[in-house]
């Protein structure tokens, strides 16, 4: 087992692993989360880390894929507020194709070779590592493919924009 592997056994360790991946991010982060529920990526520490990434300079960027942007907006998820405040650095898209909407896993990928992968987004079970570019690469490839087929989540635009 790698020294950079993070153990995930319960909600607290899942949150700690997520925060570790966020904290290790230099400039770029991708998030694939079919359902953006309250309690996911919305602690003060995670919000601060996401804001740091999004405002971290010229190459800063966060790309997010979720299946139901309207629900996340309705639930007032903190990540949606960040998307609205920093729309050029935090982009959110919604998959349109049935095969993409059937994807049930969730993951975070950073630009430092780190990842957190949940085979079933509804469960705590996860794999995480801060330095595993070979494990991260297929997830990045999948994300990029779905991103290209997806549409911007226009429903999250703030009024007047």
Image: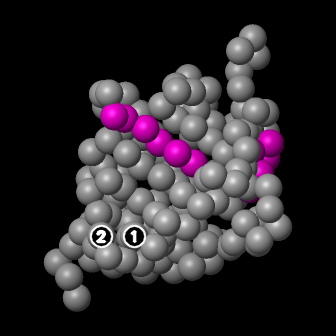
Q: Is residue 136 left or right of residue 144?
A: left
Location of residue 130 with respect to 61 vertically, above or below? below
Determine whether the residue tagged by mark 1 lies in a helix, strand or loop: helix
Is 62 displayed left or right of 56 in the figure? Answer: right
Q: Nearer the viewer, residue 111 or 106?
A: 111
Is 69 inside the magenta-drawn segment? yes
Q: Is residue 65 above or below residue 14?
A: above
Q: Report the residue at 78% width, 33% height from top.
A: 155
Q: Residue at x 30, y 70 (%)?
A: 133
Residue at the extreme left: 3
Q: Residues within 10 Å of mark 2 (few under 14, many from 20)?
A: some
The quarter of the displayed image where residue 28 is located = top left
> What percent of the width, then of the height, locates residue 151?
73, 44
Q: Which residues are magenta?
A: 59-72
The residue at which mark 2 appears reads as 133
- Few, some or many residues within 10 Å of mark 1 (<14, 14–19, 20+): some
Residue 68 in the figure: left or right of residue 93: right
Q: Position of residue 145 (x, y in %)?
A: 59, 61
* Distance (Cα) linking label 2 and label 1: 6 Å
Which quadrant would the C terminus be assigned to in this image?
top right
Which labelled disc corresponds to residue 137? 1
Q: Quadrant of the N terminus?
A: bottom left
Q: Nearer the viewer, residue 110 or 22?
A: 110
Q: Residue furthest bottom?
A: 1
In reply to whether residue 83 is colored magenta, the answer given is: no
- Residue 15 visible in the current orientation: no
Mark 2 touches mark 1? (CB < 8 Å): yes
Q: Secondary structure at mark 2?
A: helix
Task: Residue 146 in the image: state x and y as whole percent.
Answer: 64, 59
* Numbered disc total: 2
């Amino acid at each position: 087992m790698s020294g950079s592997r993070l153990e995930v056994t319960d909600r607290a360790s899942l949150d700690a692993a997520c925060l570790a991946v966020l904290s290790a991010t230099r400039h770029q982060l991708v998030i694939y989360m079919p359902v953006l529920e309250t309690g996911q990526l919305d602690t003060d520490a995670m919000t601060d880390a996401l804001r740091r990434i999004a405002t971290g300079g010229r190459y800063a960027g966060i790309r997010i894929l979720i299946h139901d942007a309207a629900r996340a907006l309705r639930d007032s998820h903190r990540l949606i507020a960040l998307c609205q405040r920093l729309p050029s650095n935090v982009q959110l898209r919604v998959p349109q194709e049935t095969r993409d909407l059937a994807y049930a896993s969730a993951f975070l990928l950073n630009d430092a070779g780190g990842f957190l992968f949940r085979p079933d987004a509804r469960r705590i079970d996860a794999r995480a590592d801060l330095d595993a570019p070979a494990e991260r690469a297929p997830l990045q490839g999948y994300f990029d493919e779905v991103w290209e087929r997806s549409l911007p989540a226009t429903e999250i635009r703030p009024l007047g924009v």
